[in-house]
Amino acid sequence: MFELLDGPPYANGEAHTGHAINKILKDFIVKSKIGLGYRVRFRPGWDCHGLPIELKIGKQKETPAPQSFKEIRSAARIVADEAIGKQMNAFRRWGVTADWDKPYTTKSSKYVAAQLDIFGQLVEQKLVYRTFKPVYWSPSSNTALAESELEYNEKHQSTSVYFRFKLINVSSPEIIWSSIPPSKPSQFYALVWTTTPWTLPLNNAICVSPNIKYSVIQFEREINNPTSTYYIIASNLVSELEKQSEQKCRILGTVKSENLIGKKYKSCWHNELALPIYEAPHVSDTVGTGLVHTSFAHGFQDYDVAVSNGERIQSFVDSRGCYTRHLGHDLDGKHVLGDVIIRSSQQWFIDVEEIGKRASSMLDEITVSAGDSDLRGSLKQLVTTRNSWCISRQRVWGTPIPGLVDENGEAYTSRELIEWVADLTRKSGNTDVWWEVDLNKILENEDVRRSLKIPKDVIPQLKKNVDIMDVWLDSGLAWHAAKENEMEREHVTDVVLEGVDQFRGWFQSLLLTSVAVKNKLPYRKIIVHGFCIDEKNNKMSKSVGNVVDPILLTDGSLKQKAIGADGLRFWVALSGSENAGESKIGPKIIEDVDRKIVSLRNGFRFMIGGCQGFNGNPINSPLKTLDQDMLHSVDSFVKKTISNYEEFKFRTVANDLTQFIQRNFSSNYVKYVRDRLYCDKIGSESHLSAQFTLHRTAYSLAHIISPLLPHLSAEVLHHLPGSHEKQILRHTFMELQSEEKYYMPELSQLMKVVHELRTVLEASAGPKIDTSKKDIIVYVKPEQEKLLKTSELELPELLNVSGVELNESRDGISVEITDSKRRYCERCRKHTRKDGDNLCSRCFDALVV
Ligand SMILES: [Zn+2]
């Protein structure tokens, strides 16, 4: 049994080239595993919840925007179902084999209930908590976001500013002056630097580091002012300040960090407020000023500083992204102007610090790869640097977080409560139950109420928690919820295959939850693929207009030839596998793919054409040497391809196949066998030998390439005499090896000499002489002559000439080209006819009825 767990695509929008890479690569695995003899489980999935769908239904014009949770959830379900239908059609059109009758969707009651079961276990292990803490926040969508949901815009330049805070109790004696201390009245400022200027009114502290050297500087333009103004900044960052401010600075002395820690400065917003300078481990002097502006509610490290110094954390930015009245009349209600901000709010978290470390060490047991490159380090680093996972969202289209909350934000939940909701969901088939159920009904259940341990006095204030779960927790529990029963769950998924972006997403959420609940890895192997870009290395983007629609590729358009599902699949094999980098697509690349497919088709066409009249059964007579050589190279190709499939090297299989058809088949076989196939008597041993060889070659190749090109494979088998496309399902790739009895023992050595002779012959004939109409005199070493004698009568065919005279020579191989003494035969176009005959003896035999 082999199981591939489908990373569910998002159930929104049409199928695109990214889906094509992902689903077709998965299909290569499924189909090749079947060919390798495994029973395979692959259930397709869809990720259905989340913000993009919820935002979309708010914007639909035809109907009034849904208001109640019931309306929103039901409209969202329709959007997801429509997208699932469209995407499933496309995936099937691409020839993807999967359990299409039993897909899993994260919105189904079965999935939601199974997800809640596991969530209950996480709660029981005390890994889930609710607290007031900074999280990424989207003011426009009014909800917390996960880091993996942020879209990084590499070209984005953030506004950064230098800002000065007036120091209160730092004075001249604490400075180590390089020359005479100043005599003028002086004022010291701490210089900070920030990329989020909107947080300056929310400043709570400045952080410095004992490991950094600080300088006291003065701007040259201020030297003659009546009061001396000094700035404190990390010594390493003075020149950067000069560059950025285009101002010359003078360094007048230094100050030790211990003379700064514990000092106070004036708040920039509340005039009467003195704020502290703290020491913090995250402060560095690689960028900024080495003095870090700190706003407890609006930064992750800032939050840690508050916790370690016992400070209170308050947020004065509301959920819409506006300053609250606490900041006074000037800012009240003004927007902070960020698409995504960091803001503290009450959220649910999973504590993943210890789990991440455990998971990281377990990762040594498995492989994380793209082709030959090992990417385990990236995943290890990501899971060990994470300490909490914000799993709540303030929306309604999702799986609920069953829990009760009191007026102070204190939360009460338990495994009993969650399982009670899971059971209700499972039994009713209704995923809205949490929103519908009455609070009193929850509290009426004795077991549930007792498990929640609610103090009596807060019972009247209780409310149901209405946050939903982060979608990464939905899909992250697929190792449990996407499986039908306990037997399926026993089997650890063999492979997951997704884009390189899933290091931040699904690979991680599967890993953390499985290690937390089962103390077991959720998969045995991770395979990574890259993204689609155009021929000029640009990302696919609607606004650039370079998006390639996979339906136009397969089905064609006015401007573009249809390359069919197999064309799309061959592109994926050639461009989408074995690397985590980009997969290019564009007209030139598609043309190249098409050319390669055409050459494969031509190869198969020749094989099928040569088999006309042949019944496909094994033959009893011995095979010709040339045929043995062909079948032998088919055997090696099959063997090599099996091992490439085992290592998921689909690009190598595709390239090998193209080369095999061009070199081994066309150049080394077709060119030589043509004469026998066209001119020998039909039904003769020599003719049957060629037909048998072509038949076996076509069958073996069609079978072994069926994971990559299933349509071409089926077409070949359909036309090949005595075979049927369904035949390949009954046989494994291993059964494609030909029996030893077909080969003479000295085949390889003999063919080695033949290949040497072909090279020498080609060199001495040059491009103008058609050697098939010539006789040749061959000189070879005695041991080579002995080998060639075993197939002496076949030498004209093996060397594609009219006649061969074999001679022994101590000097090694050489060839003389001569005119034949025999006459030209009109039928076979060789010099094989005796003087006086109409045809050569072979052609005469072939025509005798
Ligand atoms: Zn002839």
Image (cartoon, rainbow, N blue to C red):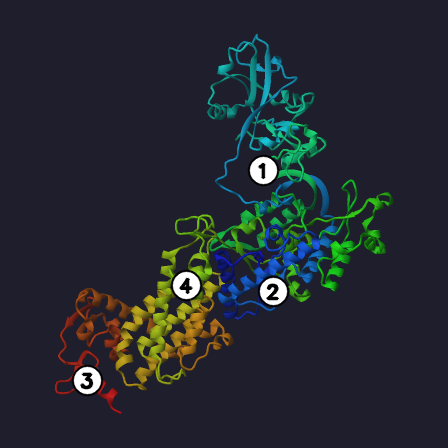
- What amino acid does circle 3 point to? Cys
Of badges 1 and 3, nearer the viewer stands: 1
SS of the residue under disc 3: loop
* Image position, residue 513 (x, y; %): 66, 53
Of badges 4 and 2, nearer the viewer stands: 4
- What amino acid does circle 1 point to? Gly
**Looking at the image, is mark 1 or mark 3 earlier in the sequence?**
1
Report the Cα–Cα distance between label 3 and label 4: 51 Å
Q: Is residue 674 left or right of residue 107?
A: left
At 66% from the left and 17% from the top, the residue drawn is 169
Residue 487 appears in which quarter of the rendering?
bottom right
Q: Which residue is mark 3?
A: 840
Of badges 2 and 1, nearer the viewer stands: 1
Of badges 3 and 4, nearer the viewer stands: 4
* Image position, residue 692 (x, y; %): 37, 80
Q: Are marks 2 and 3 in contact (CB under 8 Å)?
A: no
Q: Are marks 4 and 2 in contact (CB under 8 Å)?
A: no
Label 1 residue near ligand 1, CB within 8 Å:
no
- What amino acid does circle 4 point to? Gly
Viewer-proximal residue among 64 and 50: 64
Q: Which residue is mark 4?
A: 556
Q: Which residue is mark 1?
A: 338
